[in-house]
Image: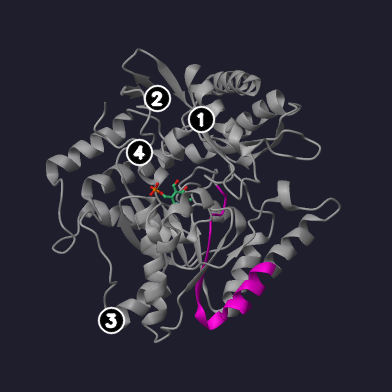
Amino acid sequence: MSNIIHRSLRQTPPIATHASGITVFDNAGNAYLDASGGAAVSSLGHGHPDVIAAMHRQIDRCAYAHTAFFTTEVAEELAQTLVAKAPAGIQGVYLVSGGSEAMETALKLARQYFAEAGETGRSLFIARRQSYHGNTLGALAVGGNEWRRKPFAPLLMEVPRVSPCYEYRDRREGQSVDAYTACLLDELETAIIKAGPEKVIGFVAEPVVGATGGAIPPTPGYFKGVRAICDRYGILFIADEVMCGMGRTGTLFAVEQEGVAPDIITVAKGLGGGYQPIGAVLAQGAIVDRLRHGSGAFLHGHTYIGHPVAAAAALAVQQVIERDNLLEQVQRRGATLKRMLGDVFGKHPHVGDIRGRGLFLGIELVQDRATKAPFAPERKLHAAIKNEAMARGLMVYPMGGTIDGQRGDHILLAPPFIVSAGELSEIVTRLSEAVDAALLK
Ligand code: PLP
């Protein structure tokens, strides 16, 4: 019996002993192709010598320096690197230890931005129903994953919710994409007006939905519309790129493809590529300036913010991505993977949609392609596919029934950026076998 409180308290997972490239090995001698990068984390795969060397160098120089006393060269350089590549106007970087921490930080930074100007009546975040923003109380409150929220509901702040941008399910027959997008934007504007614009801090959304949807991209113009509405009502647009950011969709930031600059962006997973726990909050210069010229401090902080070894790992990961032209590789390999998925699942009677960007792709499983009826949530098809995939030496990221049990099962694929075409082919073959085996159960 393990002393660790594992995700399942009834089943101890296999023990990972070592990993290399896109393969993870366990103590029973099994090898698993990592087609999900863990949870869309591993961008350079495992055992990258440049990242390991950078971490060693930093451990030897200075493994830890508390930010109450010091900054470090490596944290400063990471912040500069991120700002240099971020959307227009981003100037400030706050380094944390992961995605939920990044979201908590973003929510507090947004609130303090208004409080500094005396707008203390602003207390509301508006978010989308189909979303996941983390498991700490603030992040869980803005997230729309009912299953995760339910036991903790009394502890969570009220968050008005609007529809996600989910063309496959929600665009009506005969409705144009533009008309569908306009409806969603109307809904957002109505929610802001109903809440009282003077009470709203910001709108929170994942540019490409990850854990609750299986790589759902926005419709063209959706985020331009969001940006315009936020500007009209003087509220902040907070883009959660914890999962879809740092190159995963083929551009460093997913919102680059939308042509908008958020007020605040959160990143994590791919930032350190799994080599160290690290996340970051990126903020517009105007936000940082208001605090700088106001109270002079952001009222926040954790023991491990700006951790130098985590910063060294993230800096090395980002340098390798640039040096090896990996964003281009993500676009190329992403197109290959999408084509392969289309070849294998395009006519599959139980695959309704194949979607996503770059190496952030999802397939949605349905009982009936014509009606898009999902499988019953109790069947837990996504979990069965994960188990069948693991039995075939394949890691995929499954999810299902996250909104009122109505949205069905999805499988997310997010292999490391270094994946080869041969490995992609093997991933798709094993996934196809796993899906068919799970459907027979
Ligand atoms: N935001 C998004 C979009 C995520 O997908 C996740 C994790 O899956 C989080 C936030 C929370 O990140 P973490 O698990 O690192 O706390």
Q: What kind of residue is marked 2? A: Gly
Q: Is mark 4 within 8 Å of ligand 1?
A: no
**Does the magenta portion include 194?**
yes
Q: Which residue is mark 4?
A: 274
**Within-10-Å neighbours for mark 1: few <14, some 14–19, many 20+:** many
Q: Secondary structure beneath disc 3?
A: loop
**Secondary-structure class at tag 4:** loop
Magenta segment? 187-209
Instruction: Please tell me how crowded label 4 is: few (under 14), some (14-19), or many (20+) other residues with Cα within 10 Å.
Output: many
Which residue is depicted at the point 31% across and 16% down? 27
Q: CA distance from mark 2 to mark 3?
A: 47 Å
Image coordinates for residue 218, horizontal then vertical, percent: 64, 53
**In terms of sequence position, does the residue under pointer 4 or pointer 3 come before the other?**
4
Q: Is residue 273 left or right of residue 204?
A: left
Q: Is residue 62 left or right of residue 32?
A: left
Give the residue at x 54% y 53%. 131
Which of the labelled discs sits on residue 295, or is there none?
3
On screen, 441 above or below 37?
Answer: above
